[in-house]
Image: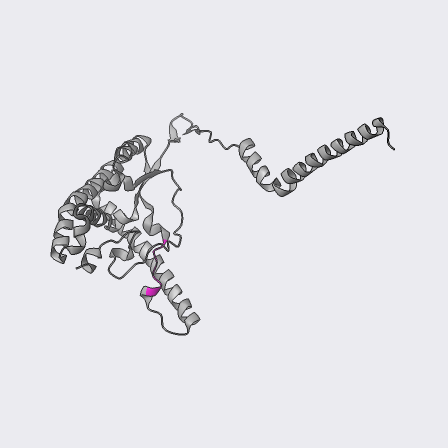
Amino acid sequence: MPSMFQRRLLLLAVVAAATVGLFTIRLVSLTIVQGHENRLEAEQVLNTVRAIPTKRGPILDRHLRPLAEDRGSYNIAVRYPVIAGVWAYDRAESRARKQAGPAWHEWSFELKIARIDQHLVRFDQQTEQLWQTLVEIGGIDRLVLEQRKNTIRRKLQRIASNYWMDRQRKRSLLLNEPVPLTDVVQPIRDQGEAQALLFDVSPEAATRVRGRIDAASQYPADSVWSQVEVNPPGHDATPRVLSPSCSIGAHCPHGYAGNSKTNTSARKET
């Protein structure tokens, strides 16, 4: 029969083995089971990215006259629904619907259009004031701004049309039957994002635009300045697809439908 000393020694060995086992299990859990997540979390804590502002010195000629100087510049971009001309109608229809409440579905077609037109004046004026401000800030002619807007509309519509026809062809081959273009139409992502209209704008002008954007943050849905962005040069990416959250019909101006029931909802609901 084991002595008291041997029993105590055995108990101590069991407790030590259990303790080591628990630590081993925990170590395996941290390093193998949860190792990847823990490593990522540690890297996020240890690795920090901080932008350090720099300024290059001017390039001078032999008489110390500046040939080139480094200065900050920005691009001013406007969301495509405003450029395409559908934002004002979207907001006017939304305000008319909200004001009418449940009675909207009982109104006649003519009454809906009349109420939308009442609100449309306000948003059209906002959009016009935006274009005038951009012309002033950019120091460009209004015709130049309109040409840039038209170029953006044509470019995105061309890219979207090519994509739609490719989808139509592939789906027709898959189903072995003709597929209407309306069944495959979807907006490319850039048709809902900001597109640059002013380039290399001075920091002072960018600050002025940011002030308008900040003021619009109080009522972002009803202010056209909530659709404006100030971006560093090179921010714009190449066109990307897709945004499958909505579809585009032939009624949409410039092939854009946005993310709401725009432009024809009043015409559909009689």
29 to the left or right of 20: left
The residue lying at 37 percent from left, 66 percent from top is 168
The residue lying at 31 percent from left, 64 percent from top is 182
Q: Position of residue 175 (x, y in %)?
A: 41, 71
- Decide whether the magenta segment is chiefly helix, strand or loop: loop
221 to the left or right of 22: left
Query: Is residue 60 among the parts visible in the rendering?
Result: no
Which residue is farthest bottom? 176
Q: Quadrant of the N terminus?
A: top right
The residue lying at 57 percent from left, 40 percent from top is 37
Query: Is residue 92 among the parts visible in the rendering?
Result: yes
In the image, 168 versus 234, the foreground residue is: 168
127 to the left or right of 22: left
Q: Position of residue 207 (x, y in %)?
A: 30, 31
The residue lying at 26 percent from left, 33 percent from top is 215
Residue 29 on the magenta segment: no
Q: Position of residue 84 (x, y in %)?
A: 26, 51
Q: Position of residue 133 (x, y in %)?
A: 22, 38
In which quarter of the view is residue 6 placed?
Answer: top right
In the image, 58 versus 244, the foreground residue is: 244
Magenta residue span: 183-188
Relative to residue 178, is residue 34 depicted above or below? above
